[in-house]
Amino acid sequence: DQCVAAGLPHCSAHGLRKAGATRLADAGASEWEVMAFLAHSTPQEAKALLTKAVEAVKQAPKGAFAKFNDLNGGYTRDDLYVFVVGIDNHVMYASGASPRLVGRNVDNVTDVNGKRIFPKITAATKAKGSSELRYTWVNPATRKPESKISYVERVGDYAVGVGYYQPNTGK
């Protein structure tokens, strides 16, 4: 592990990147300067992480949830992370970016525009087996509201999702 090699065994690579991006933002760096430090993930990277997460949930749901919630669990990288919501009970089982939501009913959680997102995610995923949702969420890496697209797949009673942030290009 690179953190151990650097003499920082108590840190994660994700945590160090996030801390660096936060310090840049706090120091007044522009969105583009933060993005240069901490690249935005691509749709392909989000889909690849979702595939990996779906397989983990199929193998051992509770073990997978623990890994998704652990910054060192292999499922959190830069601005990508896994979330898992119960299809019927709407309880958050895992969130690599918002651990405070784990164990809570997320029916009334809204994006920055007041749009309730989890009822839409679970309903679409339950009906079709998979879904894609666009909304505005605070990027944990840049700490700014950004457009986000989440890909979600149903695994039994769970909606397993990964989203990527679309950088604001000013267009």
Image (spheres, rainbow, N blue to C red):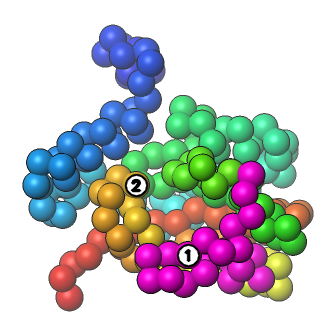
Residue at 30%, 39% in the rendered image: 19
Tell me where residue 8 appears, x and y as whole percent. Answer: 36, 16
Give the camera-side residue of 68 and 48: 68
Badge 1 marks a residue whose secondary structure is: loop
Of the numbered discs 1 and 2, the one sitting upstream in the chain is 1
Name the amino acid type tagged 1: Thr
- Depth-wise, is mark 1 or mark 2 nearer the camera? 1
Residue 98 is situated, as x and y percent measured from the top left of the image, at 55, 52
Asked if the residues shown at circle 1 and circle 2 are in contact, with their CB atoms under 8 angstroms apart, the answer is no
Quadrant in the picture for residue 151: bottom right
Residue type marked 2: Pro
Q: Give the side of residue 52 with respect to residue 158, left or right.
A: left
Residue receiving disc 1: 110
Residue at (61%, 78%) from the top-left corner?
117
Magenta: main secondary structure equals loop
Q: How many marks?
A: 2
Res 140 label:
2
- Relative placement, left or right, of 94 versus 136 is right
Res. 23 visible in picture: yes
Magenta segment includes 56: no
Quarter of the image for residue 82 reads bottom right
Q: Is residue 44 visible?
A: no
**Image height check: is 11 above or below 96?**
above
Quadrant position of the N terminus in the picture: top left
Estimate the spatial distance between the alpha carbons at disc 1 and disc 2, rounded to whole Å.
16 Å
Instruction: Please state the extent of the stretch shown in magenta in the rendering.
Output: 103-123
Residue 154 position in % (x across, y down): 79, 69
- Quadrant containing the C terminus is bottom left
Q: Is residue 68 left or right of residue 142?
A: right
